[in-house]
Image: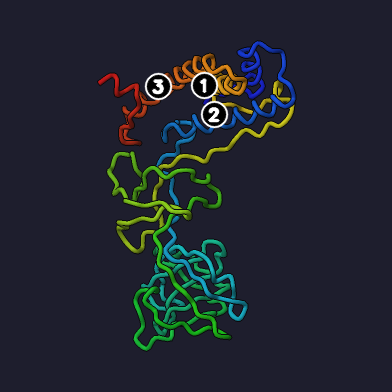
């Protein structure tokens, strides 16, 4: 993707204003206005190619456990993902194994007595047949129900290793915003069961978004451990704080002229020149409209996103 420099952007704004340099107080104002207009351009649509990531594999968190104290182990308090099926070497054959997302050495599985256990310092390794072999750790909680439950969330009583901790199990089908080694998600667009936009079709999940991530509503299987997310990367503002005209910080080329003219419009408005400010704002919108039209043409020839609407394509109908 093409970029320009922040220094070039700042110098263009100075040229539009007809000055060699801004006063120190004006310089800080211009920098703040630049970030404001940058964010405004970023927010215009979901599908800016620069920020779009298509069908990236992400973990689905199956459970959140809480209520553990130092009497057991506070590392139990975290999210868990479905790992695989037990090979029966340690624990009950064919039952589910869950692994901690934050601390991966916390494992949930069914022991040989068919009771759910939560163990720290444990591990599970995939075998040649696709099942997982557990290496037991220290048991922190054990299912105490007389009639053992198939689902972890249906367990009525967990006995702690020590003390009187009450374990709370919350079932989830959550894809969080952040995952180690991947971009932080700024906005969820689509979620599929398998890798999408290839030769075969894939089930698309319905979801709602909250402060923790995307909550999947129509999960196909309780053993689905991953989803494929199409998303928009997070917005990262410019950080230049000195030597604005020489900064080499990268500016997206598709936003360059919009930011310059709209920031100059804001500068004129601060100076009370409202008529001139409106003319510059109109110029800025024309630059942005051209970029939106370009993205519109590209994206509406693909299936990554459902058709999005702008004033440009509405006028052409």
Residue under circle 1?
258
How many angstroms separate mark 1 from mark 2 (CA)? Answer: 8 Å
Residue at the disc numbered 3: 294
Residue at the extreme front: 272
Dot 1 or dot 3: first in sequence order is 1
Q: Residue at x 49, y 66 (%)?
A: 99
Spatial CA distance of label 2 from label 3 is 20 Å
How far apart in space, not on screen, are marks 1 and 3 (Cα)?
A: 15 Å
Up/down of 253 relative to 19, above or below = below
> In front here: 79 or 181?
79
Instruction: Estimate how packed mark 2 is, as few (under 14), some (14 to 19) or many (20 or more) residues with alpha carbons within 10 Å.
Output: some
Q: Select label 1 or label 3 by which is in front.
A: 1
Furthest residue toward bottom: 146
The answer to which of marks 2 and 3 sits earlier in the sequence is 2
Q: Nearer the viewer, mark 2 or mark 3?
A: 2
Q: Earlier in the sequence, mark 1 or mark 2?
A: 2
Q: Residue 85: x, y in percent?
A: 39, 68
* Displayed quadrant of residue 104: bottom right
Please state the horizontal and vertical placement of residue 254, each as a whole percent of the image.
Answer: 50, 23
Q: Quadrant of the C terminus?
A: top left
| Residue wearing tag 2 | 37
* Numbered circle sitting on residue 117: none
């Amino acid at each position: 993707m093409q970029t320009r420099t922040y220094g070039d952007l700042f110098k263009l704004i100075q040229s539009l204003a007809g000055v060699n340099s801004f006063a120190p107080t004006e310089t800080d104002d211009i920098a703040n206005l630049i970030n404001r207009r940058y964010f405004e351009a970023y927010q215009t649509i979901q599908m800016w190619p620069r920020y779009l990531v298509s069908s990236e594999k992400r973990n689905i968190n199956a459970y959140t456990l809480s209520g553990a104290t130092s009497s057991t182990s506070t590392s139990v308090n975290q999210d868990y993902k479905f790992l695989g099926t037990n090979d029966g070497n340690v624990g009950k054959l064919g039952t589910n194994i869950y692994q901690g997302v934050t601390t991966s050495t916390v494992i949930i599985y069914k022991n040989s007595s068919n009771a759910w256990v939560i163990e720290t310092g444990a591990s599970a390794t995939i075998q040649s047949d696709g099942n997982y072999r557990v290496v037991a750790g220290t048991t922190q909680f054990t299912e105490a129900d007389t009639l053992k439950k198939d689902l972890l969330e249906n367990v009525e009583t967990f006995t702690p290793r020590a003390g009187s901790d009450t374990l709370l199990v919350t079932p989830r089908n959550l894809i969080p915003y952040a995952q180690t080694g991947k971009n932080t998600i700024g906005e969820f667009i689509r979620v599929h069961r398998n890798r999408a936009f290839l030769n075969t079709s894939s089930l698309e999940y319905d979801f709602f978004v909250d402060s923790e991530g995307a909550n999947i509503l129509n999960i196909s299987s309780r053993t689905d451990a991953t989803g494929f997310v199409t998303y928009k990367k997070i917005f990262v503002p410019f950080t230049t704080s000195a030597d604005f005209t020489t900064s080499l910080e990268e500016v997206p080329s598709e936003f360059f002229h919009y930011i310059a003219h709209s920031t100059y419009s804001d500068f004129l408005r601060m100076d009370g020149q409202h008529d001139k400010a409106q003319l510059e704002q109109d110029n800025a919108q024309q630059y942005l409209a051209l970029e939106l039209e370009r993205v519109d043409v590209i994206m509406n020839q693909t299936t990554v996103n459902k058709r999005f609407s702008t004033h440009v394509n509405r006028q052409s109908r």
